[in-house]
Amino acid sequence: MKRILFVCLGNICRSPLAEGIATAHIAQKQYPFEADSAGTSNWHEGEAPCSDSIEVAKRHDIDISLQRARPVHPDDQHRFDYIIALDRQNLSDLEAKGFQNVHLLGDYGDFNGEDVPDPYYFPNFEGFEKVYAMIERSVEDFLEKAAHERI
Ligand code: 4NP
């Protein structure tokens, strides 16, 4: 069983979507993987995902409403086989905390290293649909590559 951790800033908008999309794809393909998510901050610890993320996931038949935000923990480096940052700031914040071998989600799905934009700062539903589409494509590309031992 390989464990994958998706990390954004608050763990309430983007990484809960990545966790939910990955969990659904893993179940559909029956891959021996497990997905989780966390934030580089503890600002929203214990909170459910933001309502727009819950809504956009629901439109795609994915329920993320039971997820609860948590900050990354130093042990995550050892507990997870893959750690994936949603943007470059998250990646450098993880490196500053001592995490190594962190992947950037934008390096998958032909996004050329693009950051997944933070929808917290442009809270309109169209923005969340774009973020959803980007996360879906990059997460599925990552999972396909990981499943075929290409990462
Ligand atoms: P996330 O979005 O990193 O995708 O969960 C954010 C959530 C909260 C804040 C920033 C980004 N905040 O500043 O509280």
Image (cartoon, rainbow, N blue to C red):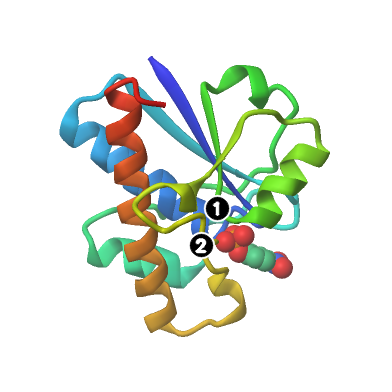
Indicate the quadrant of ligand 1 in the picture.
bottom right
Residue displayed at 32% across by 61% down: 57
Q: Is residue 19 left or right of residue 147?
A: right
Rendered location of residue 50, percent (x, y): 52, 66
In the picture of the structure, the residue carrying the numbered disc 1 is 86
Rendered location of residue 137, percent (x, y): 31, 54
Examine the image and state in which quarter residue 33 appears.
Answer: top left
Q: Residues within 10 Å of mark 1 (few under 14, many from 20)?
A: many
Q: Is residue 63 visible?
A: no
Q: Secondary structure at mark 2?
A: loop
Ligand 1 contact, mark 1 (Cβ < 8 Å):
yes
Give the quarter of the figure containing the C terminus. top left
Residue displayed at 43% across by 65% down: 53
Instruction: Judge whether 120 appears above or below 12 on screen.
Output: below
Residue displayed at 64% across by 49% down: 46
Q: Is residue 105 left or right of residue 90?
A: left
> Foreground residue, 71 or 6?
6
Q: Is residue 145 left or right of residue 71?
A: left
Q: Is residue 97 visible?
A: yes
Q: Secondary structure at mark 1?
A: loop
Outermost residue to the front: 112
Residue displayed at 55% across by 23% down: 80
Which mark, residue 116?
2
Rendered location of residue 73, percent (x, y): 72, 31
Instruction: Judge whether 142 appears above or below 2 on screen.
Output: below
For the residues bearing labels 2 and 1, Cβ distance under 8 angstroms: yes
Q: Residues within 10 Å of mark 2 (few under 14, many from 20)?
A: many
Rendered location of residue 103, percent (x, y): 55, 38
Ligand 1 contact, mark 2 (Cβ < 8 Å):
yes
